[in-house]
Every structure is written in C-alpha cells, then in structure tokens.
Amino acid sequence: MTFLRFLMLLSLVTWIGALIFFPVVAQISFTVLPSTHLAGLVVRNSLIALHWMGFVSGIVFLACSSIYNRVAIGRFRVTALSHILVIVMLGLTAISQFKIIPRMDALRVSAGEISALPAGSPVGAEFNSLHTWSTRIEGAVLILGLLVLYSVARRFSSSHA
C-alpha cells in the first residue's frame, strides 16, 4: 500500500513540478538564446516532453489509485473526483499536444519566423491565439493537478497511514 501511495504522489509531483518549471525554461530560452525562433523551438520541444511526462504520470496515477482503492475499500472507484480531474488533465494535455502544437507547427512552416511577420498579420494573429490557448490549457492542468494533489494528500492523512 505504501508503494502505491508513493507512486501516486510521485506521478502527481512529477507532472506538477514539470508544469511549474516549464515557464522558467521558456523565459530563460527567450532571454538567453540568440533568436526568438531558436527559443521557440526549445520551448516547443520542452512542451512536447512535458506532455509525454504528463501522459505517463496520469496513467500511472490512475492505475495505482484504482489498485489502491480496490485494496483499501474493496472497489476501484472509477468515478472518484481525483480520477475525473486527472482524466480532464489528460484530455487537456492531449488537446494541446495533438491539436494546438501541430497547428502552430504548420503556421511556423508556412510563415517562417513568426516574430518577423508584420503587425496585424492573420497568420501572426492565429499563432498568438493558439499560444494564448496553449498557456490557458497548461495553467488549467496545473490548477487541476494541485487540486488532485491536495485531495490525495487529504485522503492519505485521513487514512492515518
């Protein structure tokens, strides 16, 4: 049981920690690298890695939590609030990974350097809109993750383990 709890917490902390650290990587990239294009590539690749960390962490959490519930209370509790929130987190991550990033990539290919586009460019406006949605999604995943972490910590403290 202790090992299942450890894996549940580790998966959440890994995902949440990466979400918290990601803006630091982005800021440093845009500050240190010689071009916004290079910085954008570093941020894009970091975000993709973050998403895959999230997918693995979410699956590990759901599996371990389900097994933990089965052993501790005799049922899987598939509709537990923490499970629903993690599924929403996974869904939002999938939207960012498989919808937003590919669209941003297509805009980069068609337009070249996004920062070199003239003000008012429709391509630039669409890219900025997608960036805004990406930022909102990552923020929502972080908030949901913190809620799940709090919920799990509270559940473990009430089980006196």
Image (cartoon, rainbow, N blue to C red):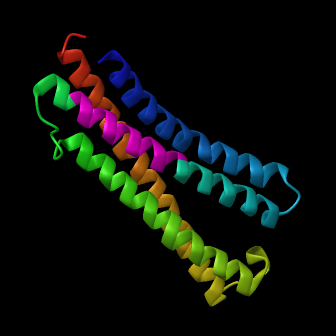
Q: Residue at x 66, y 60 (%)?
A: 44
In the image, 94 versus 40, the foreground residue is 94
Q: Residue at x 80, y 79 (%)?
A: 116
Compared to residue 101, the image places residue 21 above or below, namely above
In the figure, is residue 52 to the left or right of 109?
left
Q: Residue at x 28, y 48 (%)?
A: 85
Compared to residue 40, the image places residue 49 above or below, namely above
Hey, which quadrant is residue 9 in on the image?
top left
In the figure, is residue 23 to the left or right of 111?
left
Magenta includes 55? Answer: yes
In the image, 50 versus 26, the foreground residue is 50
Residue 65 picture location, percent across and down: 28, 34
Quadrant location of the C terminus in the rendered image: top left
Could one spot residue 118 in this view of the protein? Answer: no
Residue 2 picture location, percent across and down: 33, 16
Q: Main secondary structure of the magenta part?
A: helix
Residue 138 picture location, percent across and down: 48, 54
Magenta includes 142? Answer: no
Instruction: Please report the bounds of the magenta region as a residue range.
Output: 53-68
Hey, which quadrant is residue 30 in on the image?
bottom right
Could one spot residue 95 in this view of the protein? Answer: yes
Residue 45 picture location, percent across and down: 68, 57
